[in-house]
Image (cartoon, helix red, strand yellow):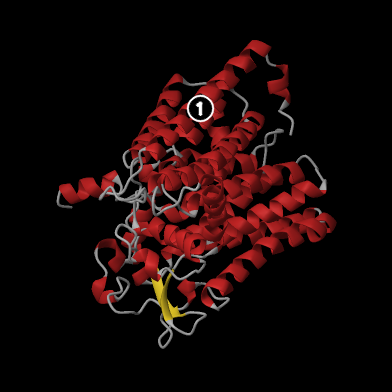
Amino acid sequence: MTLTSDAETQPLATQQLRHAIYAILVVTSLASMFGRILNVRSADRQTPFLSANDRSRWCTIRALVDLGTYHIDQVQAIKGWNTIDKVYHTGRDGQKHYFSSKPPLLPTMIAWEYWLLKRVTGANFAERPFVVGRTLLVVTNLLPLGLYFWLMVRLIERQGTTDWGRIFAVAVSTWGTYLTTFAVTLNNHLPAAICTAVVLYCLIAIWYDQRRHPGWFLLAGLAAAFAAANELPALSLYCLLFAGLLWKAPAPTLLYFLPASFVVVAGFFLTNYEAHQSLVPAYGHRQEGENWYDYPGSYWKVENRRGVDLGEPSRWRYAMHVLIGHHGVLSLTPVWILSILGVANLATRKDEAARPAVAIFVATLTFACTLFYLLRPEIDRNYGGVASGFRWLFWLTPLWLFCLLPIVDSMARSRWLRWLAIGLLAVSVLSTSYPSMNPWQHPWIYQFMEYAGW
């Protein structure tokens, strides 16, 4: 992928300085995450796991490699390994067992990492939980985030038109989003966001650069499908991308994009069937008469839920807090206000930097996914549970970053507007740094409101 003409014609010294600043931002961000991973530990200091959410996946990983099964009865009974994110149903042996409620594809993939680590070094969860857990976090979270930064820097360098705007966008990418916050815990949001960045990279290459090599379509199909496998609403990303590419380049889309995505689809349903003897994910088994979440002591019974997990009765109050309130996307990370303006800019400008297809793509996905969560029934209106941000929209981060560029480039011409942008970034960094050692806590705005009695 080539750079824009203005980048090519700039003095070499200017480009080198800009690239050096990129390198500093990326390396310091990765080093910061690495340091936090090396120190990650639970409140009881027994494991490198931080919540019931990530322990649920870790239980599956350990059960698969150490016990050869998807049921987690023995593992979750170990001190420090218990999780509320589990279901209870009949297993392959005809007996009732506990299983992680998380889709099994991602834990199964990470189980292969654990198997290899155990085979090569002899390290295992029973004897060296911190060595194993932290090593797998580095491989699963940190290294892919390095790839993510590289992709975003490439896109920013190409799309940007000013030095200040490009550097600002890279600073947001490396320090101002919740993706770095969640690097210390096993979760589905990081792989979904990284896959979304890959999709964006491929979309620019196919749509605007007229690339037709099969590799672009294969990569786009794999990434879009894996994003959807990790974030159900990202199915909208897959469908919209498929429709767009089918219209733009029907033959390679059908020959390469579609078969590549079927690999992920097959993996998703095969692992789900192997774990649960059902093609329907665990969270689809909540109906009366077959509610896998209904078992003695289950946290997910209405009478046992606490705090935000009770659900917000008022849909309007929920929408307010999701957007500009205590879990607000725009109140916690106000730098995304600039992305909203950027979508309109990309859609309407007339120069070479215009990206109307991307603007429509981002606007449609953001609106559809936000509306999806706002329209959930009361029991599901829980802000993503105990988490430091509205985590269900984190996978859209690379798309919002891309749309940020035209606005910050235009702000570069005014000192006061630059300081305004820096102020928005400062608040965003505050919000993403506040829970840096454990992202599974309420945002600082929520905690302040609790402290103030609001």
* Dot 1 alpha-carbon crowd within 10 angstroms: few under 14, some 14 to 19, many 20 or more: some
Task: Identify whether 246 is placed above or below 165.
Answer: below
x and y, in percent, of residue 359 in the image: 62, 46
Closest to the observer, 313 or 93: 93
Badge 1 marks a residue whose secondary structure is helix
**Tally of numbered tags:** 1
Q: Residue furthest front?
A: 122
Closest to the observer, 148 or 346: 148
Q: Residue furthest left?
A: 453
Residue position marked by numbered label 1 in the rendering: 27
Task: Identify whether 236 is placed above or below 125.
Answer: below
x and y, in percent, of residue 354 in the image: 67, 38
Q: Is residue 86 left or right of residue 281?
A: left
Task: Identify whether 160 is placed above or below 365.
Answer: above
Three-letter amino acid code at disc 1?
Val
Q: Is residue 2 left or right of residue 345?
A: right
* Residue at x 80%, y 43% (from the top left corner): 211
* Residue at x 50%, y 44% (from the top left corner): 141
x and y, in percent, of residue 287 in the image: 43, 83
Residue 381 seen from this side: no
* Residue at x 72%, y 56% (from the top left corner): 244
Instruction: Residue 8: name its quadrant.
Output: top right
Task: Identify whether 23 is placed above or below 192.
Answer: above
Q: Residue furthest bottom?
A: 289
**Screen quadrant of the N terminus:** top right
Instruction: Residue 306: name its quadrant.
Output: bottom left
x and y, in percent, of residue 68 in the image: 52, 66
* Residue at x 65%, y 37% (from the top left corner): 349
Q: Is residue 264 left or right of residue 39?
A: right
Residue 242 seen from this side: yes
